[in-house]
Amino acid sequence: MNTNAPEFIKMMKHPVKFRMFLFFKLPAAFFAGVRIREVDEKKCVVTVPYKWLSQNPFRSTYFACLSMAAELSTGALAMTQLYKSDPPVSMLVVKVESEYFKKATDKSSFFCEDGELFQKAIEETIATGEPRTVKAKSIGTNKAGEKVAEFYITWSFKSKFKK
């Protein structure tokens, strides 16, 4: 486990620091209103509102905004394990799969509980120097708790120093 994870989690929970991170690193997510609501080493919950900047012509949340929230719910878990890691490890999305079940017409919440998968893959890539992938699942629900979408985001991890 990354001993720096609590420091990263604290930063992601800080409303100003997190918004600055979004503004400079993920500006589309910043303007769409994507926010982390909960995060720890194992689970992350991210929301995206239905509003003018996140809408599509069909009076629902644009699929790309839903995808941003799903990706952040998985990526934040990976970043928690990678924060100040030694040796450094690069991460990259290599595949996105999605299925939509219901129109997203209000705030959508995306849940990912695959933190342990990220931890294991990152530990393995550091130990072996070989790349590893994680196929993380993020489920999006509306305010009523109904499933609106399900995403599988496949992340690749590679240690920047080979053993």
Image: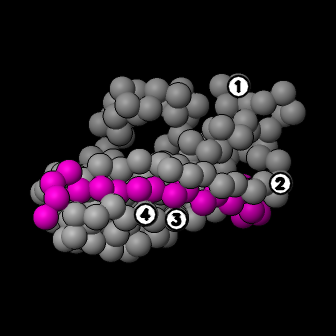
Q: Amino acid at mark 4?
A: Thr
Rendered residue at 49%/43% (across/down): 35
Rendered residue at 74%/31% (across/down): 55
Q: Nearer the viewer, residue 73 or 12?
A: 73
- Can residue 157 be seen here? The reply is yes
As drawn, is 79 to the left or to the right of 7?
A: right
Q: Which residue is mark 2?
A: 102
Rate crowding at label 2 as few (under 14), some (14 to 19) or many (20 or more) other CA atoms within 10 Å: few
- Quick one: SS at disc 4? strand
Magenta residues (range): 140-163
Check residue 133 in the rendering and tell me which mark sits there, or answer none: 4
Question: Which of pointers 2 and 3 lies earlier in the amino acid sequence?
Answer: 2
Q: Which residue is mark 1?
A: 52
Figure quadrant of residue 117: bottom left
Q: Amino acid at mark 3?
A: Lys
Q: Looking at the image, do the residues carrying marks 1 and 2 touch, with CB atoms under 8 Å apart? A: no
As drawn, is 51 to the left or to the right of 31?
A: right
Q: Amino acid at mark 2?
A: Lys
- Can residue 143 be seen here? The reply is no
Q: Looking at the image, do the residues carrying marks 2 and 3 touch, with CB atoms under 8 Å apart? A: no
Q: Looking at the image, do the residues carrying marks 4 and 2 touch, with CB atoms under 8 Å apart? A: no
Q: Looking at the image, do the residues carrying marks 1 and 3 touch, with CB atoms under 8 Å apart? A: no
Q: CA distance from mark 2 to mark 3?
A: 23 Å
